[in-house]
Amino acid sequence: MKIKLPFKLPLYAKIIFCALLLGLAVKGAAVLSAPFADLYTTTVGAALRALFGALSSLIPFSIAETLILLFVPLVIWLVVWILQDGDRRRRLAAALCAALSLCAYLCASFFLLYGAGYHTTPLAKKLYPNADEVTADGIFETAVYLMVEANAAAKAMTYDATGAAISPDTLAGTSKALCAAYNRAASTYDFLPPMYAAAKELALSVPLTYTQMAGFYTFYTGEVNVSVNYPDFTVAFTAAHEMAHQRGVAREDEADFVAFLVCISSDDPFLQYSGYMSMLQSALTALARLDETRATDLFSYATDGVRSEFAAYVRKMTSYANLTAARAANALNNTYLRAQGVADGTHSYNRAVDLAVAYYYDGLQNGSLYDLVG
């Protein structure tokens, strides 16, 4: 029996639905084959992400945020338009077609641009295939290394009245420095494709802080979106983290680790500081879970700058404590990550420290930690 639509299916809908079918095929192949996921993510997927990122960079504000803000008004307008006198059945069909096309576009763009990244060969296997199991001693020794580097980097920083280091640049300037650092890293790491796309400041940075989210990458617009309502070192590191997603590093722990590598290999002292401080923060948290005494003893070696930075961070985040918003955002993110095959969901962020431990020991075995990010 042939189904007759009350109107002709628009060309845009046909294209989007075909893209969805192609995306589903890519997703299925990526799930079945890590080598395929590796190849697709660094070739076709990288080209599409670079294209979307370049096009979205032509618009100075966040397209994704604007679309989210316009969603409710648009739905209201659509309902009013459907209920007007005339051929309501035809308008309803057109509205449903548009809605289904939008959903299909979101799914297609995810599968074609980003989704395969969750099924690539784990970064630990690519970089440190012989790494030993992470222990409390390993985390402690890595935290010591990070503390030494953070203390040294802090000497070049200027701190404000709250105790937070002041970035010498705007988010736009930080984006340029990060893109340059990423493109240099691309010559060392073949899973990082070279590209340029600016990070964008979110207009709703303050409300977003209540969810404990510092930024997000929107695959359907190709944008890196960053909340600027955090200490400057967190803003810079968040931009680096989301840029890792933009380059196909989908898993959260791997994006954190790649952001760390890129920041500390940058020529920009503030990015170096941001990388060391962010990973030190994670390492101290991980160490405290296993051995609170050693974590406390190690923190006693922090310089005044490092101490004031962490204290400023705690004060800032305490002032935006909202358990309901944070729990809702965490639950949503946890569900999304589990749906992509990340078994431990949001807890996967913690594994960035495991990669840092492997990096630390691998650097010792090869004679120099710095040669790895040269």
Image (spheres, rainbow, N blue to C red):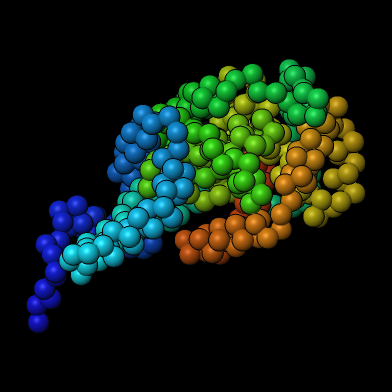
Image point 77% across, 23% down: which residue? 160
Image height check: is 359 above or below 198?
Answer: below
Image position of 336 with respect to 248: above or below: below
Q: Is residue 134 above or below residue 157?
A: below
**Residue 323 in the image: x percent, y percent?**
71, 58
Which quarter of the picture shows residue 306?
Answer: top right
- Residue 348 pos. (x, y %): 61, 55
Left or right: where does residue 353 sit relative to residue 106?
right
Residue lying at 55% horizontally and 27% vertically, measured from the top left: 171
Q: Nearer the viewer, residue 202 or 339?
A: 202
Q: Nearer the viewer, residue 258 or 313?
A: 313
**Residue drawn 52% across the image and 59% down it:** 337
Q: In the image, is 249 to the left or to the right of 139? A: left
Query: Is residue 156 at all visible to an observer of this figure?
Result: yes
Q: Is residue 354 visible?
A: no
What residue sits 37% from the left and 35% below the top? 56
Compared across the picture, whether 322 is left or right of 292 comes to left
Q: Position of residue 98 (x, y in %)?
A: 27, 58
